[in-house]
Image (cartoon, rainbow, N blue to C red):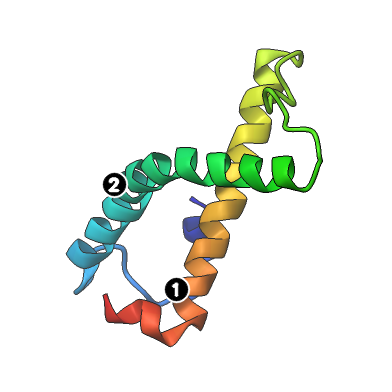
Amino acid sequence: SLERLAPWRRSQKVLRRGVAQDLFWLVFNGHYLGLLLALGTGHLVEAFNGVLSRAGLPVPDTLAVLSGAPLWMQFVVFLVLKDFVEWNIHRLLHNVPWLWEF
C-alpha cells in the first residue's frame, strides 16, 4: 500500500500493539459495512427516484455511465472511485470525534 511507501509515521512498525484491532476494522469497513450499505442502497434509489418524479423530472432507467467503455477502463475507474470513497471515510473517522466511539 501507499502507506508502506510513504508512511505517515515512519517509526511505526507493521506488527505493533493494536494491529489486531486495525485488522478488524479493515475487514468490517471493507466488507461487512459494504454489505450493509448495499442493502440500504435500493431504498435510497427508490426514494431519490420518487423525489425526481414528484418534481416532474425524468427518472433514469439505468446509471450505466461506463457500460460502453472497455472493461479495463471500467476497472480503473472503479478502483479510483473506490479508493477515493475509502480515503474519505478514513478521513472522516479521524476528523469526526464521535465516530471513534464505536
Res. 2 visible in picture: no
| Residue located at (34% from left, 41% from top) | 35
Crowding near the residue tagged with mark 1, few <14, some 14–19, many ≥20 C-alpha atoms within 10 Å: some
Q: Position of residue 31 (x, y in %)?
A: 32, 44
Left or right, residue 57 beside residue 86 = right
Q: Position of residue 67 (x, y in %)?
A: 70, 17
The residue closer to the viewer here, 27 or 8, is: 27
Q: Is residue 62 left or right of residue 40?
A: right
Location of residue 20 with respect to 12 vertically, above or below: above
Which quarter of the picture shows residue 13?
A: bottom left
Residue at 59% from the left image edge and 37% from the top image edge: 79
Q: Residue 90, percent across and down? A: 48, 66
Query: Tag count in the figure?
Result: 2
Q: Which residue is mark 2?
A: 32
For the residues bearing labels 2 and 1, Cβ distance under 8 angstroms: no
* Quadrant showing the C terminus: bottom left
